[in-house]
Image (spheres, grey):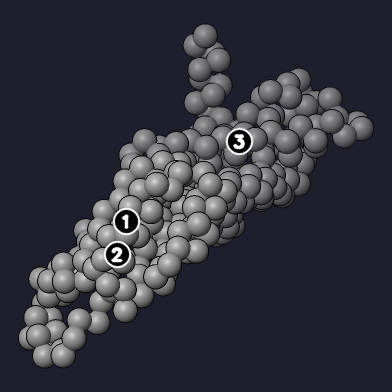
Amino acid sequence: MKAWLTAHIQACERAFMRFRFQPVSSLLSVAVIGIAITLPLGLYLLFANITAAASRVNTDPDVNVYLALNATDQEARELEKRLKQIDGVSQVKFVSRETALAEMKRVANLADLLTGLESNPLPHAFSLRPASSNPETLTVLRKNIAALPKVEHVVMDFEWAQKLKRFATFAERLVMLLGIVLASAVVFVTGNTIRLQILTQKDEIEVSQLIGATRRFIRRPFLYFGAVQGFFAGLVAIAVVSGIVAWIGSEVQALTVSYGSEFALQSHSAGQALGVVALSALLGWLGALISVSLYLRQPGRL
């Protein structure tokens, strides 16, 4: 056990020595791998924040029905009775034009401007709660309501929020696919770097094989070198994404506050950062393993 641990410690030391003696090429490789990891990580955080914002939006079915401006109070009451009799409508709330105008004065702080109007420009309206959120059922319900007399517009407020959620789901799958592609690129870049390292130490490897060095002994330092490259690349990706989030986070928060909301960009957690670093190190190790294994399996190798 002690000999096994000593061999691994020595291999790790040799990997760090390669960084010391070849700083430029090693740092370039780390930068390339770090950029490849930054893209899916940044997109993941972007769409995670979009999903979080979408979850704060009310997506319960809610239908607003606006009547024509010339609709009288009596016609609105008759229409209310007909709306309550439609299948698929569980709740009907009447909003008179007077109530809507008073609410606008209170919320929009336009009391002085609206007071100067000669007549009320707002129509009577109804707020409906459908019994089902099935898209086909809601489409039929919209057509039935729009066909009623004095109905001018039928608006389903939750449609855009549902589209936003569907987009977030699509984006999540897209980021996953992109992550797989770029993970393959990380393995390729690491493997290519290790292959160049092997070629520069070709004579040393051949001599080691002649004096009895096993494949594990030869392969071990390169595996650590690939893992170390991936480890530092993961740190680079975490630092870049954290810097971007901190840079634009304050502006996003100021923008949402101006619209009467409070939303701040969320960065990755400590556990996620640790996972990214561990995964990038694993990808670097895998790239090195593939590269060294292919070299040692060439004809004439032990």
Q: Measuring 67% from the left and 40% from the top, which residue is drawn there?
A: 287
Element at badge 3?
helix
Task: Give, as a three-letter code, the residue at label 3.
Answer: Trp
Q: Residue furthest right?
A: 299
CA separation, marks 3 and 2?
72 Å
Discs 1, 2 touching: Cβ within 8 Å: yes
Question: Is tag 3's residue or tag 2's residue first in the polypeptide sequence?
Answer: 2
- Categorize mark 1 by other alpha carbons within 10 Å: few (<14), some (14-19), many (20+): some
- Nearer the observer, 114 or 290: 114
Q: What residue sits right under mark 3 in the picture?
A: 285
- Categorize mark 2 by other alpha carbons within 10 Å: few (<14), some (14-19), many (20+): many
Residue 61 seen: yes
Element at badge 1?
helix
- Nearer the observer, 257 or 209: 257
The quadrant of the image that shows the C terminus is: top right
Single out the mark in the foreground, 3 or 2: 2
Q: Quadrant of residue 262?
A: bottom left
Q: Which mark is residue 76?
A: 2
Task: Give, as a three-letter code, the residue at label 1.
Answer: Glu
Identify whether 244 is placed above or below 286. Answer: below
Identify whether 67 is placed above or below 24. Answer: below
Q: Position of residue 212 (x, y in %)?
A: 76, 20
Discs 3, 1 touching: Cβ within 8 Å: no
- Nearer the observer, 164 or 131: 131
